[in-house]
Image: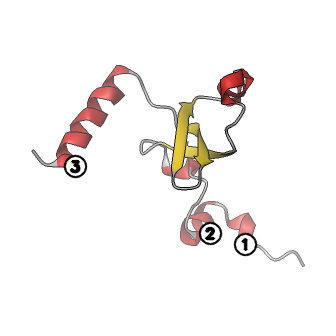
Amino acid sequence: MNIIFKFKSIFKKELAKEPIQDYQFIIHHQRATDRVFFGPFKNYEELNKFFQNSKNSGVQHCVEILISPTCPKEQYWYNPPKYLEENHSYLFQNSD
């Protein structure tokens, strides 16, 4: 079985169980030889609970956002300039 096909079928099953949030957070922890990721966390409250646990106090972290593949295009954090110009033309108007 093709690994991509397998991933897609697993993803569809998970999506059918519970809708995936458009955005979630992960913690990126870098060590001398590798990187470790914790999460995903649904919101900042979950992140705070993670750090309130004393065993996680040594995590040197960077919080990163995950964007779901099911997120609507207009909600992406990055949109191509053509899309922005067509749908948000006020961003391209002169301030004169």
Closer to the N terminus: mark 2 or mark 1? Answer: 2
Q: Which mark is residue 85?
A: 2
The quadrant holding residue 53 is: top right
Residue 25: image location, x then y, percent: 59, 38
Q: Can you identify the residue that label 1 sits on?
A: 92
Numbered disc 3: secondary structure: helix
Q: Is residue 69 left or right of residue 47?
A: left
Locate the N terminus and report the quarter of the image it occupies. Answer: top left
Q: Is residue 92 left or right of residue 80?
A: right
Determine contact: label 2, label 1, CB under 8 Å.
yes
Residue 8: image location, x then y, percent: 25, 41
Residue 12: image location, x then y, percent: 28, 33
**Residue type at mark 1?**
Phe
Q: Can you identify the residue that label 3 sits on?
A: 4
Residue 49 visible in the displayed image: no
Numbered disc 1: secondary structure: helix
Q: Which mark is residue 78?
A: none
Determine contact: label 3, label 1, CB under 8 Å.
no
